[in-house]
Image (tube, rainbow, N blue to C red):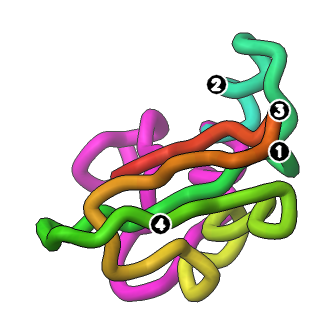
Amino acid sequence: MIGDFGQLRFGKKYGNEIDEQVIKNRKRYFDILGIDLDDLVMQEQVHKDKIALVSRNDIGAGVYDSKTFIENNDGMIVIDRDVFLVCF
């Protein structure tokens, strides 16, 4: 096993790093659902009273680099079809 959750890790490890195993796990999970990683928008959820409006322009946010997460929001609303939202 690697780290706290072994090879099942889905989120970043420590700091802002998203390692290769996390990318592989995400790909494996979303492949089962028939969703391409490039159609995801990821948010690192914080408990505030802000909701982010996201669109196709935001796809890929947070998927490969945690520096690109949608930040400082408690939720997301998508305004375009075929954009998939992920909260941590």
Label 4 – label 3 distance at C-alpha: 17 Å
Return the residue at label 2: 29
Crowding around mark 4 (Cα neighbors within 10 Å: few <14, some 14 to 19, many 20+) is some
Of mark 3 and mark 1, the one earlier in the sequence is 1
What element does badge 4 sit on?
A: strand
Of mark 1 and mark 2, the one earlier in the sequence is 2
* First to last magenta residue range: 1-25
Return the residue at label 1: 39
Label 3 – label 1 distance at C-alpha: 7 Å
Q: Are marks 4 and 1 in contact (CB under 8 Å)?
A: no
Q: Is residue 78 left or right of residue 52?
A: right
Label 3 – label 2 distance at C-alpha: 17 Å
Q: Is residue 44 left or right of residue 30?
A: left
Q: Is residue 38 left or right of residue 60?
A: right
Find residue 58 and report its horizontal and vertical position in percent.
Answer: 75, 67
Q: Residue at x 76, y 41 (%)?
A: 83
